[in-house]
């Protein structure tokens, strides 16, 4: 038989979420009748909003007519009207429509983006981070030939983001010519980089010939107007940053599938060629465009009614986050020395259980409260002793989970 891609043997055991699922299943099997609530996986739970549903329904109807039918789009980067609306509404035209590439989601785009740089690129990630950045880098061979240790992959640069540094990393550890993955608002920590911090990041990238892959999937959760919602609010970012984003979290499109990537005209490789040209080549080769039905939904999401519906949806999850935060600040958690981090601009609450292992806390919460969380160490070595609580859930489940958490002891 033919050999497996040799990089696969270096993947650290399993992806985080299957392991959580396994433990949940095992617990359920030995505790029949337990009403398990998940504050674990970052999956949306609330229905699509009416205006967006109507736009998609109407478009489906028109697809059933001779005049309205549409097959492959002319350009895999998406409908011009949608690209224009994204550029105008979300970027105030700081980016142009031709720099916006509509996709079937941010995760898929991360995978395709890694092909831009191949196996020779140096990779730097925030630690902890969304697992896709590291696992994807391993699969394309950019993480070196050696398997991971408990400290991570030797050839990936980890940038610890901890309470001690206000979750903004010491950039001096990043080598020249690195691809820097940066996510703000952050999954899992919920931290949002300030304008000053992003200026530091952009300046560092420019001075050291790095490219930033900025994941802004949670930008719509930012409520503090002084915090930047896109990397392009920073001067010079167009020369050094690609931004990925998604309708998944703000509009509940996790199943519908729609995202976009901004690749600025100005961004160049070492040899002077445009990154945008290579990106168009990749997407035109492997991708035939996002679902046109999803695109109509996204288009509706960005008009006045759509924006106000999305705001309502996000407010709901942010309220859940503040309910969770309150529960984690109750006396029993204080007595355990638990520290809670949640700034109100992200759907995640990040809590530290000093001196404990993440998986040990995960198992204890599952067995005592029947609540599924996410162990911080699954996001990287610096996540050890932390737990991520997700606010994606129905209000009544979140309230019930919080009631149970108020009796939790370690
Ligand atoms: C959920 C999430 C995404 C979104 O991925 P989609 O493929 O668009 O659903 C991207 N980045 C981060 C950090 C996420 O948490």
Image (spheres, rainbow, N blue to C red):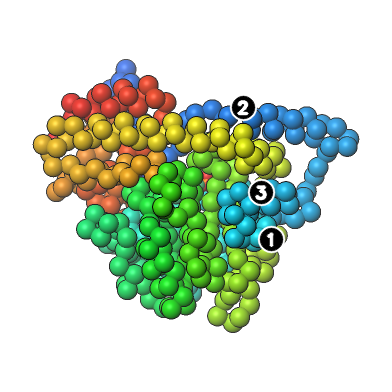
| In front: label 3 or label 2 | 3
Residue 85 has which mark? 3
**Which residue lies under the disc numbered 2?**
50
Query: Pointer 3 and pointer 2: residues touching (CB < 8 Å)?
Result: no
Mark 3 or 1, nearer chain start: 3
Of the pair 319 and 78, the residue shown nearer to us: 319
SS at circle 2: helix
Q: Residue furthest right?
A: 66
Mark 1 or 2, nearer chain start: 2
Q: Is residue 317 visible?
A: yes
Rendered location of residue 102, percent (x, y): 64, 52
The answer to whether 382 appears left or right of 215 in the picture is left
- Quarter of the image for the N terminus: give it: bottom right
Rendered location of residue 270, percent (x, y): 55, 80
**Which residue lies under the disc numbered 1?**
98
Residue at x 60% of width, y 63% of height: 263
- Say above or below: 136 vs 237: above
């Amino acid at each position: 038989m033919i050999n497996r891609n040799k990089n696969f043997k270096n993947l650290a055991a399993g992806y985080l979420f299957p392991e959580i699922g396994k433990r949940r299943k095992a617990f359920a099997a030995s505790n029949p009748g337990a009403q398990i609530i998940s504050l674990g996986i970052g999956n949306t739970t609330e229905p699509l909003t009416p205006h967006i549903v109507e736009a998609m329904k109407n478009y489906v109807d028109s697809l059933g007519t001779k005049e309205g039918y549409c097959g492959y789009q002319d350009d895999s980067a998406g409908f011009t009207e949608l690209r224009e609306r994204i550029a105008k509404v979300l970027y105030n035209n700081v980016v142009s429509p031709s720099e916006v590439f509509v996709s079937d989601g941010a995760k898929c785009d991360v995978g395709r983006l890694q092909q831009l740089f191949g196996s020779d690129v140096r990779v730097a990630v925030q630690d902890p981070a969304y697992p896709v950045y590291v696992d994807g880098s391993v699969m394309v061979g950019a993480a070196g030939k050696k398997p991971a240790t408990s400290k991570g992959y030797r050839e990936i640069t980890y940038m610890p983001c901890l309470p001690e540094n206000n979750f903004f990393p010491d950039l001096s550890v990043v080598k020249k010519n690195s691809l820097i993955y940066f996510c703000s608002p952050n999954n899992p920590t919920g931290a949002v980089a300030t304008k000053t911090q992003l200026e530091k990041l952009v300046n560092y990238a420019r001075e050291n010939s790095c490219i930033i892959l900025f994941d802004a999937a949670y930008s719509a959760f930012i409520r503090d107007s002084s915090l930047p919602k896109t990397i392009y609010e920073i001067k010079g970012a167009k020369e050094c940053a690609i931004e990925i984003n998604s309708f998944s979290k703000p509009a509940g499109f996790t199943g519908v599938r729609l995202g976009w990537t901004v690749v600025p005209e100005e961004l160049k490789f070492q040899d002077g060629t445009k990154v945008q040209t290579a990106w168009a080549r990749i997407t035109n080769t492997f991708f035939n465009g996002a679902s046109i039905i999803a695109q109509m939904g996204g288009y509706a999401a960005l008009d006045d009614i759509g924006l106000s519906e999305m705001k309502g949806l996000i407010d709901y999850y942010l309220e859940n986050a503040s309910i969770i935060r309150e529960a984690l600040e109750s006396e029993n958690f204080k007595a355990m020395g638990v520290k809670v981090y949640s700034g109100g601009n992200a759907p995640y609450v990040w809590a530290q259980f000093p001196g404990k292992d993440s998986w040990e806390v995960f198992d204890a919460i599952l067995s005592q409260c029947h609540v599924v969380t996410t162990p911080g160490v699954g996001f990287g070595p610096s996540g050890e002793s932390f737990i991520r609580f997700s606010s994606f859930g129905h209000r009544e489940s979140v309230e019930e989970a919080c009631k149970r958490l108020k009796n939790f002891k370690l």
